[in-house]
Amino acid sequence: MARLADYFVVVGYDHEKSSNGQSCGRTIQRFPEKDWDDCPYTQGIELFCQPTGWDLSSKRQEPTFFVSVLTDIDADRHYLSCLTFHEGVPLTAVPKPDESDEVPENNHNNHIVQPSMMFAPKSLVLISSHDSFETLRNCLGLIYTVYIENIPNVQIETLIGNILSSVQVPPPGGPQVRFSIGAGDRQALQPPLSHTIPTTNETVATLFQQLSINTIIQLFCAALSDHKILFLSNSYNRLTSACQALTALLYPFKYTYVYIPVLPAHLIEVLNTPTPFIAGVHGSLKLEVQDLLDVIICDLDGGSVMIPECVQLSIIPEPAHTRVTDALKKLLHPDLSWADKAFPPSPSSMKTTARDMLDKEIRAVFLRLFAEILIGYRSCLTLIRIHPEPFITFHKANFLGHRGLVEDDFMTKMLDSMCFSAFVSERGPPYRICDIYDEVFASMQTVINEERLSNEAMMNHIKQIAQQLYINENPNPQPYVQKIPKATEGSHNRIHIPSFPAIDWVHVQEIIDEGVTKSNIKARPQQPRIVPMGASVSQSSDKSIVSSNARRLEVLRNCVAFIFENKITDARKIFPAVLRAMKSKMARLALTHELAYHVQTNKAQLEHQQFDLVVRLMNCALQNDSSNDENGVAAAILPLATSFCRKLSTGIIQFAYTCVQEHAVWNNTQFWEATFYQDCERQIRQLYLPDYQDQLGVLTHIATRSPRSQSRDSRRSWSVGPGSSGQPESPKRLQYRPREIGALEIAAEQLRIWPTLSKEQQQEMINNEESTVYSQAIHYANRMVYLRVPLDASRSLSSSKYDTEDNSNSNVNSSVAESDSLNETESGFDEGDVPEVGTNVVKFVTRFVDKVCSESGVTEEHIKSLHQMIPGVVAMHIETLEAVHKESKRLPPIQKPKILTPTLLPGEEIVMEGLRVYLIADGREEGLGTVLGGPALLPAEGAVFLTTYRVIFKGTPVDPLACEQIVCRMFPISTLTKEKKINVQYLQHIEQWLQEGVQLRSNTFQLMKVVFDEEVGTENADTFRKLLHRMRNPPSVWSTFAFTGCAVTQPTQMHAHKDKNSSLKAFAKRTLHKTAKTVGLKGKDPNRKQKYIHPSPTIPRKTYSPKGSPTSSRPSSVYDDNLSIIEEGEVPAFMTMDPKVLEKLFEKPGYKDFQRMGLGELPSFANTKSRTDPYRISTVNCGFSVCRSYPALIVVPQSVSDDSIRKFSRSHRQYRFPVITWRHDKTKAVLLRASGFHTKGVMSMLKSHSHHHQPTPSASLSELSTSVEQEKYFHAVVSSTPIGQLSHSQISDSLTSIDSLILTAGTSDTLTIPETPGGTRKNYLARAVSSLRSSGGRVKSLGRLGSVKSDKRMSSASLQAPARANGNVEPSIGDVGIQGLHRAALYVLGEKAQVKAVKVEQFPKCDFIPVEFTEVRHVKASFKKLMRACVPSATSADPEMSFYKAVQDSDWLKQLQNILQLAGVVVDLMDVQGSSVMLCLEDGWDITTQVSAVAQVLLDPYYRTIEGFRALIEKEWLSFGHRFTHRSNQTAANQASGFAPIFLQFLDVVHQIHLQFPLSFEFNQYFLKFLAFHYVSNRFRTFMLDNEYERMMAGWLLEEKHIPTKDDENLGNGSGFVNRPQSIGQSIWDYIEKFHRRSPIFFNFEYTELENHVVLRPFSNISNLRIWDYFVSESLDHGPSYDIEIVAKEMKQVEEDDLVDGTGSLRKIANFCYDNQHLKMPEGCSYLLSEIHRLEKELDRSPQKWHPLWDKLDHPDHEQLTRQVSLNTQLAQSHGRSIHKRSTIEILMRAKMSGETAKMFSQPHKFEKHNYTMTTLIYCDYCSQVLFWGLIKTGMRCTDCNYNCHEKCMPYVPKNCASYKRNSEASTSQQSLAKAPSETNVGTLDTLRASDQNYDQFQFVSSVQEHRTHEGYLFKRGALFGGWKQRWFVLDSMKHQLRQYETSEDSNCKGFIDFSDVTSVTALKKVEGAPKRSDENAFFEMRTNKRIYHFLAPDSQAAQDWIDKIQSCITG
């Protein structure tokens, strides 16, 4: 018996601490005043009485009641029932002390002290250990009723005393107690039948009424997986009820964490605890708890749950989750079963479940859930001790492995929770009191099997369990009517209510003492019994795989038999099959059984070969299993590893454990504990088994054993192993076995008889069990030492040697292997000497012993002796292993393949000899022999070499059955971009784990993943990496391979001025002087020696300008300012005006190109005529004094003087002023290149304004002269352009110009574009700066482009312009929204931020076009993504991340498109319009070079030859200073900047053009790949250093050109180019020229000179661009084929070897994954030329050169190939040119537009869901898949351009909506198309004019146009009902479609017929069902592959026109 309540407390408002109506609670009285011995009083209950705070109220409140829960230090819960009411408190209003004492005469009454009444809360509290909430509510209600109603003859003291003493709660299973506390009441208490089952009344049903099913399941899973849960509600009772319901659903688990259903506001900080909890707070605190990061918040009032993003919530595994959800839906929504019935049952016949019964049914569902997910858990319990108390653990790994839940996150977390640990402790003992869960669990497997056959069985079972739960709460069926007097309704609002009286504590104590003596109710105690076992865990596993593995197990058994019979040859034959079978857990368990059988037959000592094979099998079994040992493989191998051995020498034996130590399972403490406990259980069982053998002597067949015995035996023999209960066995060995009693059964019997034993017997049993556990601890301490101490004690075992999670099969996931570090488990080894290894092992074993012995009840003496024993065991074992290790080294080593020596270039030396490694596969599929076919070349075994030029791997495939070909992978060491260390690689073919490896990635798209062989020490691997970094990062270019073997005298330091800063003082002085000069505080010293200075821009390296500022936001050059200063005395002698030097320099191909274009001659050779030419070659920069990064000779206008150039060069970044690089031979327009304009930021403008009143004369004059000279230069360029010599009236926009594409008929010369809101927007920052510049009404203008001038001046251009009346500055481009697009003589393409600040009136006939381009940093990022896409290091785990998706995400093709479009602008402006173009982008050496070079390739056919392409590269890339050293990271100083593939991008663009125009290039694709490879290889000097100045300082720029001789031609065919002694390095052009003379390796046989005269206009759409095969192709035969000599040598060696071996054959086999296709299968012409060369040698004739022989061939006459050009061909050609020019128009128009108008060029589609009515298939325009299937024909269609796509494809569709507004005169377009010329000369102006006329009838809106060849109304016959409907049809000859519209005004296409499916179009006579009055000859029929269409035209002539047009499109 127990008290109903332990304490009664009166808690009131503490008036002494009151402040502003708020205070705290105060305990007024408590009873009893002395604590109970068994239940101490809980302090701090005042906070829980008013959780939101103690506040006064202005009016009386109705009494409230709620229950809080308090948990004491022993985790016992105390229920605090609180009834709160309010008492009146008289208060006095007191004036504030700071108020004035003076009171106005008319306001005396306001300060009279007036009494007022407030109401303070008071709480009556009962503290109880029982959750009888309703009884506690009634008792408190009676006390309040007696108080408020003043019931006579009833004392409150009596009521309290009776509650605390007289009312006794019977124990569970006891009788019903009826009582009265003395207030005229009648009450009853009915205890439940079982104390382990929680009582809920209706709380669970209430919770499901407040929240949804899924929400409650989420909360349920969160509670089981140890998450924090917080409830919110405005009702305290709801909070308590919800928490009680959630914990009740966890039954049979008990929630053991923090449990606070009602948390006071003052304790809200408790929610920040790291431990899990279930708590509740009032809804008013919602805002204070919403920021909790890891708390799941459930709003009971709103019915919602918020799960933070950081919380990963696991859900119940399937199919249990579905079963629970379905059952709950049927219970909570029974109407679902008849909702869709035609005749639903009447309401009267529907049975409704009572609320309390619904509560139990819901609980039954969750009770079944626990029984289902824990099926077999009792068979995984491990018994360690029986006496004095049972100690039982749970084998988690065994349970998860058998249930197949190893990867299930929910089950893993639940089994690791404290709830489950308490569950095992409470319900693990086999002899205890049982409840309903034990019964449900025992039969759950049978119930599930029955429910699979019957749908109603589940609900019937739920109702049965619910009935038992209901009976548990209500065991007494007889109802009892209680009588509870209550207070009168509204009694709390009475005016005069007395205060709650003080209670006489003496009287209360007397009643308590009297009542305690009367407690005499006794209950029948519940009897313990044997707990039912339930189904075995093995019965729930899948047994279907037994038969499929029977053959594999038979092979395994035969292999093991061969090994022990010493038939090694036979064993090796089937050994690979056995290794593959090891992937199955059943095979691994079968292996352990077979090995154990041979150990029992005394075959443990093996021969060397036997030992090696057995160890390999054991290692393979361990490797395929995880570190948690779910299947028990490691536990079975553990005794085997200490049994098998071999004899090394006399007295020295090596055991198998020394060869299986390298596995993570031996580092797993949980494995050792679980295995130790299993062996202890086995020994405890053997201890008591003799007492039960007599009773169990009957033999039983194995299949009839009990589940428990099967499970116990499953951990001792594989025959009924963990995977199944019936493994195939040898019938001779394991046919019958006696029934074995389990350890739990023995324990149950022992616990039953324990009370009957004497104390002596009990103590003897305790001692025996303790000794057994102690002996096992000794045994396992030795085992752990064996497995933890390595054979070589001088090294340590790596704990991360094997993956602890992902080793589910023999193939290691490459993504895991590539990671920098694996998940490391605890390791007992550190690198160091032997004592340190031993110390770590001692620590590891000691920790294990302490834990298991303390838990198992081993005495302290025994534990202490173990501590003393372990160090000695470790020391002795280490000493023993020293001899074993020494003898094992004497064993003959395993034969490994011979290391192959690589072929080297002349001068190439091996830096580090070959290290034996394995080349493993990466993310590519080539060479694996999988989907791409071919032999399995990888992994390959060989060696990695490091030379002065390359990193080379050479070896052979590991799989000897794959092939015997040599695998070679190499790349230049200078191309290495990333070196990454990789760990833990397992090679299946050699069954070895390799510790360490390295992954090397090259920017030539090579990836080398190698792992070092075990013979390679760590020191050698580290040395290899160090040498690799040293060779990759040379101190200067002179240390690279290009200058190997050359006597190079390094040039004078280019930064000689740095010597002036030899001391810190000198450096500071120099810096201060320089700063003073910059800000104008100090003038130049006239006596100081004059210097030419061209520093870097004044803007910082990366400037972020505010919006509207003209300052560029792009990063400027990283050139150091000091690099741009050259003293006059520092200029070398050969860099002067010596005519011989200039003449020698002029012989370079880049300079000779100027002479070819007629751009001038050297001054020494210039004649009178040349001086009249518009251009000249200037020597102003011959000493590199103006711009160091420019060439010595530049082309400028004739009228511009050298002094003028020196002045205005300062207006450009890096002093890279505009120079002429190319001239159009017809239009005479010129192409100029420069860097971006200098701009001043806001601070510079403010500084200029601050110094306005103190102008510096020299600075003003300098800026004035700079601006004037700049305008003169622009004027000179305009004047030299033919179109610039015309007046404005003569420059008319005709159809010959590009403007004609955007002009409609009859428009003016300029394009009028409607105004936009953004068009008139002003630049407020510019306006503010303008106000700063204004002074005295004077007009300020720009001194240089984008800079602010301080002095007033008038230029020649400004004098011609009319003056403004208001004196304001002329508007700039940035101030005007949109300007008219007119023809200009000079177009300047520049950056947006800089061009906006240009004053356009100062530069007549010039137009400044801001363009967008890709910055270098984005190019770098794109290249990295491209490399990861083309050469992935590991296979992508994301199935959606395909190769093409990865390439798309890299944006590489978009950047190529941008370059092509900008080059296209240059082409159209110069070729079509005849305007000159100036490129002023960035620093002038990246995107400027790309666009300029690509434009010249498109415009000039000379650059498409090998000679011309060389001249182009030397001129644009080398002479004009592309920073190859910096961008390619050639030296150590440039490594931090990252590789920038600017030149590679240019080559890729040329490759794209080459693909579209293969007849126009003399060189082939291999030529471009060769350049792409060697511009970063550092083999040639050509692409070394950054500019011409540095190359001249290096000494090779003026080097004499070597004329090839006969000796050079005979230099080995493959021996390489030999450098002459006077040569500094080798030029790539000499190399190309030599091999080009020798063979057509770089020649394009499709090259046609006539086609070469065409101006190329390639398509720049992404769909027309291709991924360069240079990025994705690889050959493993010789590596990259770009080192021609190496490939030739190796091929020759292979041929010689074949001749020697006699294996040569004329038949060649080419493997796509291995051979180089270019070499293995050469082009037909190359092959024939080589055959001619071979035959001439055989005939002893002098071989002819291939090129003269090729020229002698008769080429077909081009005129004979001319054919009649069809209409479709004309349309296609004109369409291509139009698209190209439209791209130009878009760029020009986008530059002129702002605001909303510019968005029309990047217009997104307006997609809407569309229902298609066509019967033909419609395809998605994005993915080209069928748009819909079946009857539902819906998809997404753009309402503007009829673009069709799937809904899933919408996010990826490019924003290029093409909506067109047709002109009313559509017929004119058709007539012009019909009159197109029959012959088209592509590239001429006449053809462009003709093509332009085809488009002048359309108003341009976007970049794609619809071609309407023919259109009109037709009647079409329907396919379904045969009806005729009139529709508008459009024939599109470009898309080859016939499109259907509703009307002629409709813009939405209803469907189309693709002409590729049309087979015929024929005329028909009148058909049946035709419309009335129709012409019988107006019908025609169109047949397709899928359907026949019938059409009706208005008349026969219209029908014939349609037939002819369609037929023309089909056949054309």
Image (tube, grey):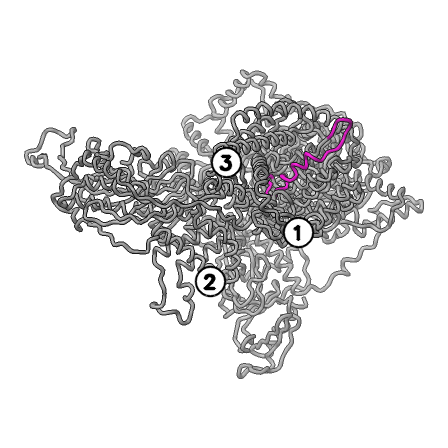
The N terminus: image quadrant: top left
Q: Is residue 917 visible?
A: yes
For marks 3 and 2, give the one nearer the viewer.
3
Crowd rating for badge 3 (residues with CA inside 10 Å; few <14, some 14–19, many 20+): many
Q: What is the three-letter code of the residue carrying label 3?
A: His
Q: Position of residue 783 (x, y in %)?
A: 63, 32
Q: What is the three-letter code of the residue carrying label 1?
A: Leu
Residue 1583 figure quarter: top right
Residue at label 3? 387
Crowd rating for badge 1 (residues with CA inside 10 Å; few <14, some 14–19, many 20+): many
Tally the marks.
Answer: 3
Magenta stretch contains residue 1584: no
Secondary element at image label 1: loop
* Mark before the other along the chain sequence, 3 or 1: 3
Residue at label 2? 456
Q: Position of residue 1918 (x, y in %)?
A: 55, 75
Q: Is residue 1483 visible?
A: no
Secondary element at image label 3: loop
* Mark before the other along the chain sequence, 3 or 2: 3
- Kindly indicate whether the residue at mark 2 contacts the one at mark 1 (C-beta within 8 angstroms): no
Q: Is residue 329 left or right of residue 634?
A: left
For marks 1 and 2, give the one nearer the viewer.
2
Residue at label 1? 1656
Secondary element at image label 2: loop
Q: What is the three-letter code of the residue carrying label 2?
A: Glu
* Mark before the other along the chain sequence, 1 or 2: 2
For marks 3 and 1, give the one nearer the viewer.
3
Q: Position of residue 969 (x, y in %)?
A: 73, 39
Residue 1929 figure quarter: bottom right
